Image (cartoon, helix red, strand yellow):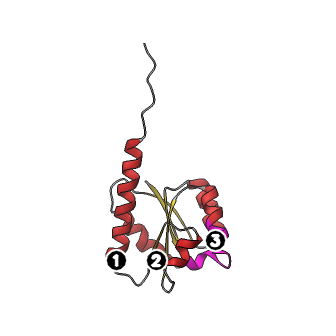
């Protein structure tokens, strides 16, 4: 499962990368510190998971989330320190985790995403082999 991290603070990007990389089959595909680089990275890396700081989305978060969805159908987890949980979810995020939540909250979300992703991947039929 390919993932990217988008946060304005390099230390947060590094911490999130280290946290997620500890899981098997989680492949780091890059990081962005602003919206323009996030959109470019999403188009080129085609991640399965995006960990995204809400404040990075700027004045039009719903539009930016829509642009991200157009570039890649990744699962989007929004992180912020001071939002009503319903705001990012109504804007199009799949999950919301507060930066003040205990780390176990984010870990639980990542484990849930991995479980659903692995089940979905395993359910895909394998291509038919030609008869020889």
* Residue sitting at x 62%, y 73%: 34
- The chief SS type of the magenta part is helix
Is 104 situated left or right of 76 in this image?
Answer: left
Question: In the rendered image, which quarter is residue 28 located in?
Answer: bottom left
Is 92 situated left or right of 67 in this image?
Answer: left
Mark number for residue 12? Answer: 2
Residue 17's spot in the image, x, y percent? Answer: 42, 67
Q: Which residue is mark 1?
A: 103
The question of residue 55 being in magenta is answered with yes
Q: Which residues are magenta?
A: 54-65
Between 52 and 14, the residue placed more toward the observer is 52
Q: CA distance from mark 2 to mark 3?
A: 23 Å
Residue 77 in sight in this render: yes
Label 2 vs label 3, nearer the camera = 3
* Residue sitting at x 64%, y 64%: 66
* Residue sitting at x 68%, y 75%: 60
Report the residue that reaches farthest toward the top. 132
Residue 105's spot in the image, x, y percent? Answer: 35, 75
Q: Total number of numbered labels?
A: 3
Label 1 vs label 3, nearer the camera = 3
| Element under disc 1 | helix
| Element under disc 3 | helix
Is 29 situated left or right of 101 in this image?
Answer: right
Between 109 and 56, the residue placed more toward the observer is 109
Is 89 situated left or right of 108 in this image?
Answer: right
Q: Residues within 10 Å of mark 3 (few under 14, many from 20)?
A: some
Mark number for residue 62? Answer: 3
Residue 53 in sight in this render: no
Q: Quadrant of the C terminus?
A: top left
Label 1 vs label 2, nearer the camera = 1
């Amino acid at each position: 499962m390919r993932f990217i991290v988008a946060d304005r603070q390099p230390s947060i990007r590094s911490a999130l990368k280290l946290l997620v990389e500890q899981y098997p089959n989680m492949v780091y595909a890059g990081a962005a510190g602003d919206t323009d680089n996030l959109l470019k990275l999403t188009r080129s890396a085609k991640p399965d998971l995006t960990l995204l700081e809400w404040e990075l989305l700027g004045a039009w978060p719903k539009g930016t989330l829509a642009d991200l969805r157009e570039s890649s159908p990744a699962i989007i987890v929004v992180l912020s320190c001071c939002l009503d949980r319903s705001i990012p979810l109504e804007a199009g995020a799949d999950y919301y985790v507060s930066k003040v939540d205990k780390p176990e909250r984010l870990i639980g979300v990542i484990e849930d995403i991995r479980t659903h992703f692995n089940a979905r991947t395993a359910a895909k039929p394998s291509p038919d082999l030609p008869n020889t």
